Amino acid sequence: MKNKFLHLIVGLVLLTLATSCNQQSSSQEQVRVGNYSIVHNTIVFDEPQRIEGQKSVLQFAVDPIENVRIGFIGLGMRGPDAVDRMTYIDGVTVVALCDIEPDRVEKVQTDILEAKGLPRAAAYTGREAWRELCERDDIDLVYICTNWQTHVEMAVYAMQHGKHVAVEVPAATSIEECWQLVDVAEQTQRHCMMLENCCYDFFELTALNLAQQGILGELIHGEGAYIHNLEPYWHDYYENWRLEFNQSHVGDVYPTHGLGPLCQAFNIHRGDRMKTLVAMGTPSYNGKKIAKEMMGVDDFANGDMTTTMIQTEKGKTLLIEHDVYTYRPYNRLFQLTGTEGFANKYPVEGFTILEDKLPEGFLDADQHLNPHAFVPTAVRDKILAEYLHPIAKEIEAKAKEVGGHGGMDFIMDYRLIYCLQHGLPLDQDVYDAAEWSCLGELTAASIANGGMPVAMPDFTRGDWNKVQGYKHAQ
Ligand SMILES: NC(=O)c1ccc[n+]([C@@H]2O[C@H](COP(=O)([O-])OP(=O)(O)OC[C@H]3O[C@@H](n4cnc5c(N)ncnc54)[C@H](O)[C@@H]3O)[C@@H](O)[C@H]2O)c1
């Protein structure tokens, strides 16, 4: 009798435990937080459906535009150099210039256009005048160099008024904005290219070329970063937009310089896709100090250092870092690890290459390469010269003369115009813009949930495997 009673009690306890476990696991299966759900310990953002009549812009191209007529919005630290670079490209007309501040527009008119004997452009000034620029019927491309918070509104309006768009980095600041860019580009069938200039630096292009020629073997891991102490510049951003943004945003808010060149090398949405991300951030120390001095506030959301790991559908890994606050050497890390080779930029440029991967006669007769070390400097320089990517080779001398971060900015603009003039798909499409920019909100969500994995949205809506291998159209 005593035994039976004991069994009954144990049974009841087990049943209660099982029921409560079940309730807990079913309630843990899906938790709703704002615009995402937590499903089986993974954060999944809402993905809007493609609306009827909207179609993919993968490999999108338009008829050749012989003379590309450009309207520029935003003439602060970055914009005037973009105007200047474009004046070196044949078949480009600077039609209109816009900034809130009239003196910034006037300075570009006199110091760049008039100084080169070019006609003055139509001038738009004030906070809303950019809309009139977008509404003109004699502009093909709207080139946006304003603060991050304004990019999407301007890009969307420009596309809805029939213009192609080139927009500075990051193109968007939230998942919703990323989808907006994708959806409007698909609805209007317009180009929307983010101006990720680091994809065009000489070392990155050479490493991409080595990877594409199989010299590094199968790429398995990549690292990229934006580590740049912005202390000397915080005061120069118009109305303090950058510090204000960072003050209220956790996560990697400026990921595209590190991520862009890696995504091209890893064929993202051209045979592979970024699938899952986890991020962690440190507390804010230096950011907080600057915000106290400049804004009189005690809180600062953005951690001094943010680290993100991404895994692709094929299982490859990418590491991305962001630090714009601490005292470190400038480091726009770019690193590729392949099964048979390695490329590294910052703090030193170098390669590890297996000697049988190089063509016969490339090395001196009795020369051998150490597979555990960087190749000697002379071999590295020969690799940099002989494996320079064809798109850089064709324009190298002019790019170095015009400049812009050592020439990469000019190669970017040159390629943008070349593709438009030849009716080719652009080097970076709107899906790249969304994939590279979306890290901001995704990393914030991961950090807010203790480094929880985040499912990365597929902005191509299932088309990521249709194109095999990243290519620059020729
Ligand atoms: N790719 C790179 O290497 C690189 C380098 C620097 C900056 N950037 C990017 O360029 C963009 C601009 O940065 P910046 O350093 O020139 O900032 P900035 O503050 O110096 O300039 C922004 C300009 O935009 C103008 N502006 C803002 N709102 C406007 C509106 N409604 N209408 C017209 N003009 C408006 C401002 O008046 C200002 O002149 C940012 O997206 C930044 O991330 C990229």
Image (tube, helix red, strand yellow):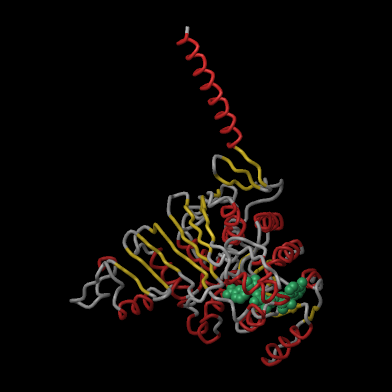
Judged from the image, the quadrant occupied by ligand 1 is bottom right
Q: Is residue 315 above or below residue 3?
A: below
Q: Is residue 132 above or below residue 406?
A: above
> In the rendered picture of this protein, how many numbered marks are placed on residues?
0
Instruction: Indicate the quadrant where residue 92 lies.
Output: bottom right
State the residue lying farthest toward the front. Answer: 2
| Front residue of 227 and 23 | 23
**Image coords of residue 421 (percent x, y):** 61, 72
State the residue lying farthest toward the left. Answer: 366
Instruction: Indicate the quadrant where residue 221 lies.
Output: bottom left
In the displayed structure image, the side of residue 364 where residue 217 appears, left or right: right
| Front residue of 356 and 452 | 452
In the displayed structure image, the side of residue 225 where residue 130 appears, left or right: right
Residue drawn at (65%, 69%) of the image = 166
Residue drawn at (73%, 66%) of the image = 154
In the displayed structure image, the side of residue 347 where residue 129 appears, left or right: right
